[in-house]
């Protein structure tokens, strides 16, 4: 959910920031994000959070143009904000209400509660949806520190359950981003996966946090927030590898330890009949597994654990 570009005042579809794995056009419904995750590298929070001007007819024209060019697969709501935070949940509902009946596919990502009326709407179009609910920590105190404007773990689990009960098959739990030494403990992560399993969600994706280490005040503030928290301080000390990713780079847990964790996750999820994939958006070491020769951007099986192949999760109509 992290890019560094600022928004236009008017909502427009933009090409994917992660073309190696996400093939939807991006649409942000606010400028700034009220969730205010401490690890987020977006740099405009001091300007406050504002809704952007969403003109449905203009968006429809833009979609038609993209379709004519053969480049439109669907809409990713929202890479740089939370589409269901209170400030924009109604706007998001209107967008879905307008475009779902027209056959547009959506990938939705949130740390908020999806309102019941929206779940009822989504229930009519299950084949056009991939809904990703982010939940990395069941510890409510840590959750409030790390993602202060987000819904509680309990509410996010309820949202997962409601989506599954509404008949939406492609609901994915995002254990992203994980703080090393805090969230990757086997017992803790197993307990979280068991809670997710109880909701009926079967798709799990995980990835470690990347924190930029630069002289910019925003980056210094993020690191200080980690250093000032007894558990996250431990995390920061473990993040000794520097990594480059699609949208910048920063400090991360060393590769060997990340891969050991992904292997463990694969085992825990497989034992429970759940589908695990490591996510390569913040972990460029996983690009080594990209199979250029196959028609897929990312191959399904890494030697020791699966990495995300979005084709695996895409609505059927988008599979090529
Ligand atoms: S939800 Fe968190 S990570 Fe995503 S854009 Fe908002 S503040 Fe950043």
Image (cartoon, rainbow, N blue to C red):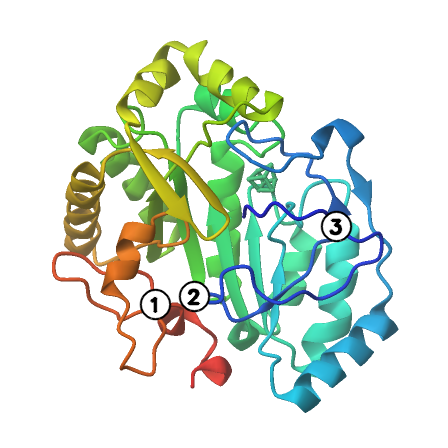
Give above or below for 287 relative to 299: above
In-front residue for pair 258/35: 258
Position of 292 with respect to 131 (left or right) is: left
Front position in the image: 292 or 214: 214
- Residue of label 1: 309
Please tell me whether residue 91 is drawn above or below residue 248 in the rendered image.
below
Q: Earlier in the sequence, mark 1 or mark 2?
A: 2
Tell me if label 1 and label 2 are in contact, CB under 8 Å: yes
Name the residue furthest front: 215
- Which of the two labelled residues, at mark 3 and mark 2, occupies the earlier sequence position? 3
Q: Quadrant of ligand 1?
A: top right
Q: Secondary structure at mark 1?
A: loop
- Residue 266 left/right relative to 49: left
Query: Can residue 135 be seen from the camera position used here?
Result: no
- Residue topped by disc 3: 7
Q: Which mark is residue 21?
A: 2
Q: Position of residue 254 (x, y in %)?
A: 23, 35
Few, some or many C-alpha atoms within 10 Å of disc 2 (few <14, some 14-19, many ≥20)?
Answer: some
Labels 3 & 2 near each other (Cβ < 8 A): no
- Give the spatial CA distance, label 1 vs label 2: 7 Å
Looking at the rendered image, the disc whose residue lies closer to the viewer, 1 or 3, is: 3
Q: Are marks 1 and 3 in contact (CB under 8 Å)?
A: no
Q: Earlier in the sequence, mark 1 or mark 3?
A: 3
Residue drawn at x 42%, y 56% is: 172
Above or below for 61 versus 10: below
> Percent x, y for residue 126?
54, 72
């Amino acid at each position: 959910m992290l890019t560094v570009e600022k928004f236009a005042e008017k909502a427009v579809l933009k090409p994917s920031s992660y073309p190696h794995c996400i093939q939807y056009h991006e649409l942000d419904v606010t400028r700034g994000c009220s969730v205010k995750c401490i690890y987020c590298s977006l740099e405009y929070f001091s300007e406050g959070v504002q809704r952007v001007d969403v003109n449905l007819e203009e968006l429809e024209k833009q979609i038609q143009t993209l379709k004519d060019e053969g480049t439109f697969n669907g809409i990713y709501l929202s890479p740089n904000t939370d589409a269901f935070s209170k400030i924009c949940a109604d706007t998001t509902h209107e967008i879905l209400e307008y475009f779902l009946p027209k056959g547009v596919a959506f990938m939705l990502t949130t740390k908020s509660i999806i309102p019941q009326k929206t779940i009822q709407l989504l229930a009519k179009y299950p084949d056009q949806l991939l809904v990703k609910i982010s939940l990395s920590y069941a510890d409510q105190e840590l959750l409030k520190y790390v993602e202060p404007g987000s819904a509680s773990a309990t509410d996010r689990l309820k949202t997962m359950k409601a989506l599954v009960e509404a008949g939406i098959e492609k609901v994915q739990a995002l254990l992203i981003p994980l703080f090393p030494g805090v969230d990757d403990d086997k017992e803790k992560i197993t307990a979280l996966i068991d809670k997710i399993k109880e909701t009926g969600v079967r798709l799990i994706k995980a990835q470690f946090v990347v924190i930029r280490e630069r002289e910019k005040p925003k980056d210094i503030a993020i690191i200080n927030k980690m250093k000032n928290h007894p558990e996250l301080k431990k995390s920061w000390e473990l993040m000794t590898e520097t990594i480059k990713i699609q949208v910048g780079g920063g400090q991360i847990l060393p590769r060997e330890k990340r891969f050991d964790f992904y292997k463990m996750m694969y085992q825990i999820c497989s034992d429970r009949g759940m589908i695990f994939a490591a996510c390569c958006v913040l972990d460029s070491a996983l690009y080594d597994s990209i199979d250029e020769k196959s028609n897929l951007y990312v191959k399904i099986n890494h030697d020791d654990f699966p990495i995300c192949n979005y084709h695996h999760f895409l609505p059927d109509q988008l599979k090529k």
